[in-house]
Image: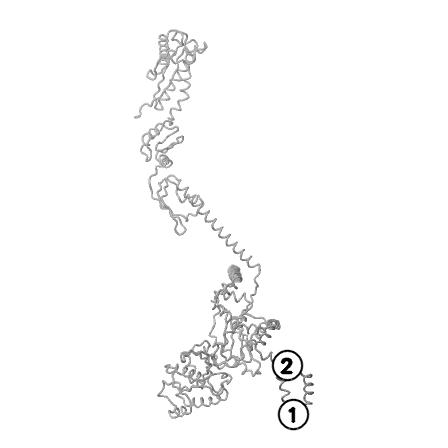
Amino acid sequence: MADQAHRRAPTGQAQENPPGNNHAYEELRHLIIAPEQEELADIQERLDDRARRTQDVSSVVAEAIIMRRDQRGEPTLAQALAPSVQETLRESVRRDPHPLADALFPVMGPAIRKSISEALRGMLESFNQALEHSLSARGVQWRLEAFRTGKPFAEIVLMHSLLFRVEQVFLIHRHTGLALNHVVVRSVPTQDASMVAGMLSAIQQFVRDSFDSKKEESLDSLNVGELEVWIEEGPDAVLAAVIRGHAPADYRLTMKEALEEIQRRYSSALENFKGDATPFLSAEELLSRLLAAQHREPPQARKPRAALAAMAIILLVMVGWAAYSTYRLWEWRQFLHAVRGQPGIVVISYDREGGRYHIQGFKDPLAADPNALLAEAGLDPKSAEFDLAPYYSLDDAIVALRARQLLHPPEGVTLSENHGELRVEGTASPQWISLVQERARYIAGVTSVDTSRLHNSHLLQLDSAKSAIESTILLFPIGRAELEPGQGDSIVQTEKQVRDIVAQASRLGEQTTVELTGHSDSTGIEGTNMLLSQERADAIRAILIRGGVQAANLRTRGVGTTQPLRPEDTEENRRLNRSVTCRITFTPVSSGN
Amino acid sequence: MLQKKICMLGSFSVGKTSLVRRFVESIFSEAYHTSIGVKVDKKVVRVDDEDVTLVLWDIHGEDVYQKIRMSYLRGMSGYLLVVDGTRNPTLDDALALNERVIQEAGKVPAILVFNKSDLLDKWEIDPARESGLAEAGWNILRASAKTGDSVEKVFSQLAAAMLVE
């Protein structure tokens, strides 16, 4: 281009100026403006040449982006780039998803982990809150309130624990009052956004008209019970936030900023709005940021502690209950064991129904009362019901009891029973003894009767007299059958004793037999000794008969040296063996009498 | 979905509210009529296989106590001018009102609705006058809120007219 100008200049000039002057002028001109011309030409080329321009921009594009990013916190750059980046990503995935997947791989794991832990934390927090609210006195109060007002409990909790919550945000086209977008907190019931938006506009206009306020002033909040509606008007758009509770004043600023951003971003869409709200769908993210909330009590460390304490109490109650149940069960088992061990009671089965035990089985009429056993075990008599059929028990204790009932043993007699054998021990009148012998075998469960230790009380009365007589030894000289001199007193005494015992026994219905046994020492011949001992016994018999004793009560025998009273090692012992001793037996006179 | 603001206009007790009561979605109490003079309802109609949401501003009938607030007409895409076919003066009032509406909101699609078409024996409006109005460019429909006759048609015709605009 510089060359062209250089060449064109002489041809232009050649027609007007003389050749001599021309050359000098050309020279001068070249000297003065040639450098600028060259520079201009260079710049022109840079601008015209697409390749060079691209090269120039490429050298600064990164710095430019950085500079733009640093300028202000505004997201315009991001907004400008977003569609291209999205498109690029989409295209990249469409062509081959692997490179992007590979690139994202290192961040996917942490992101997923973070999201899971966030979800868990949220769950734990809401669990803590629910636990605390359901256990505290305040929680009970709120439950009552929910019951009284018919509102769901969750709403009552929210009402009391929230300072404020923005539940809905409407973006409204100012001119038509039509809803452009509407966001709402999950689980909040909503009405039709288009009607609400229309009505809000109508109210706005009504207020503006009615109170003749200046055009730029307008209704900026409404109160409806626990709800407030904050309205922020822009030139073309209106933002309305439905707030439960009382939002802080700076929330108004947040609304203003959002509205300004919307006015700016959607200025042409707002201006050309003809009823199609599609362009405003993308405002959702911006509106969602306005759905703020603040709780009355920020989550503190106290909460988990309260929850833990509550859980500990629940656990304690559960453990206590389990322990008590186990104890009750153990108590019941003990009782059942005791009942099963009870003679005369047979438990066949038991079951539990409606908190009561029902016991089936058999019971002897003589067995213990199970209800009394229940009371004895410290159990509620109403906790069990017995259904026991009567039967005859062959348990030893019951058979003994039955025998006792039937025989009425007198004092001093014990009855015991072992596997069908009834043992009667003690002292009783002969009449009762005969009654036992007659009846005992008819008692159910008794197969045999042992009365070997049952003593006749009458005979015992005679015992002392009997042993006095039996301890008397009547002595004889060697080889003779007459009493030793000096034995007169003894024989007189024995005579009297025998008469008395016979008379006494006779009164008690006993026949007395006095057996007189003659003894001899070992001196002399055995045959003679036998004879001698018989003679000695007979001698005493004669004396007693003379003394008034009936012959029928006396019996004699000689035993010689066969039953010595003493070993014959001394003279004195030998002397004692030359003697007569007495043995007394009684026999009942006759059962008929 | 396309939304359009439309207004229901007409004298007091010509049956505007009855006309919409059975045919639209409503969440607000009719007490709003007497308090702020308007109640907003909604009606979805289908025009050429497309659903159109009509946001219906049912404006309280004009009487000696209450004038229509013209600011309520702002941004409307069309309106229904409702007349009681059994009372001639309501037509006169409606036409006078229409002048003011055009002055305030400009010319938008409108339908002149002769309500109470079930009471033909008490009909007061002269057929000649009716045809005259039609010739003057009015889109006229006879309808009955009581029997439901032509009510759907009123809304769908207005919607169709607005979409053409």
State the mark number for residue A40: 2
Q: How many marks?
A: 2
Residue located beneath label 1 in the image: A16
Residue pictured at 64% horizontal, 87% vertical: A10
Residue extending farthest to the front is A20
* Chain bearing mark 2: A
Q: Is residue B14 positioned above or below A81 on the image?
A: below
Q: Is residue A545 positioned above or below A283 on the image?
A: above
Q: Quadrant of the C terminus of chain B?
A: bottom left
Disc 1 and disc 2 on one polypeptide chain? yes
Q: Is residue A4 positioned above or below A344 on the image?
A: below
Instruction: From the top left corner, tell me how far across and down residue A20 is, in percent.
Output: 69, 90
Q: Residues within 10 Å of mark 2 (few under 14, many from 20)?
A: some
Look at label 1 and name its amino acid: Glu
Q: CA distance from mark 1 to mark 2?
A: 27 Å
Q: Secondary structure at mark 1?
A: loop
Residue A139 visible in image: no
Q: Is residue A14 positioned above or below A92 on the image?
A: below
Instruction: From the top left corner, tell me how far across and down residue A42 is, in percent.
Output: 62, 79
Q: Quadrant of the N terminus of chain B?
A: bottom left
Quarter of the image for residue A548 reads: top left
* Chain bearing mark 1: A
Residue A458 visible in image: yes
Q: Is residue A488 left or right of residue A301?
A: left
Q: Secondary structure at mark 2?
A: helix
Q: Earlier in the sequence, mark 1 or mark 2?
A: 1
Instruction: From the top left corner, tell me how far across and down residue A94 is, in percent.
Output: 47, 68
Look at label 2 and name its amino acid: Leu
Front in this rendered view, residue B114 or A237? A237
